[in-house]
Image (tube, rainbow, N blue to C red):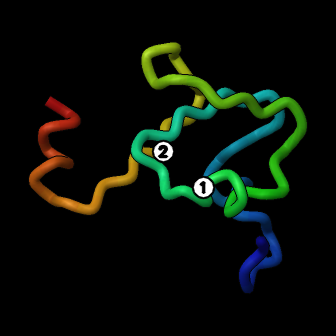
Amino acid sequence: MAGYSGKPLSEKLGIKPGCAVAPINPPSDYRELLAPLPAGVRFRESKEQPDVIHYFCTERSRLGVMFQ
């Protein structure tokens, strides 16, 4: 879904063709929000060395724990 800039959300977030993306705690509609995805985008676990990590956190206390 493109916003006022006309660019898809996936492009705004730095997802490029062939990119490996690791979402952590994504919302249930995460992939739908990113559509359309560039060609060859793969989703994987963060421990598999992705190109892009999207970390979703709703509690400030958990944010600090993740990066220790």
Residue 52, x across and y down, in percent: 56, 35
Give whichever of discs 2 and 1 has the lower sequence position.
Answer: 1
The foreground one among 14 and 61 is: 61
- The amino acid at mark 2 is His
Q: Which of the 4 image quadrants contains residue 59?
A: bottom left
Pointer 2 and pointer 1: residues touching (CB < 8 Å)? yes
Q: Residue at x 72, y 59 (%)?
A: 32
From this view, report whether residue 37 is shown above or below residue 49. below
Residue ranking furthest to the front: 28
Secondary structure, mark 1, is helix
Which residue does the numbered mark 1 point to in the structure image? 30
- The amino acid at mark 1 is Tyr
Quarter of the figure that contains the N terminus: bottom right
Say the numbered circle drawn on residue 54: 2
Say the numbered circle drawn on residue 22: none
Q: Residue at x 85, y 44 (%)?
A: 38
Residue 50, x across and y down, in percent: 56, 23
Select label 2 or label 1 by which is in front.
1
Quarter of the figure that contains the C terminus: top left
Q: CA distance from mark 2 to mark 1?
A: 10 Å
In the picture provided, is 28 more to the left or to the right than 31? left
Residue ranking furthest to the top: 48
Residue 44, x across and y down, in percent: 59, 24
In the picture provided, is 15 more to the left or to the right than 21? right
Residue ranking furthest to the right: 39
Secondary structure, mark 2, is strand
Q: Residues within 10 Å of mark 2 (few under 14, many from 20)?
A: few
Residue ranking furthest to the left: 61
In the picture provided, is 8 more to the left or to the right than 64? right
Q: Residue at x 85, y 30 (%)?
A: 40
Residue 62, x across and y down, in percent: 16, 48
Q: Which of the 4 image quadrants contains residue 36?
A: bottom right
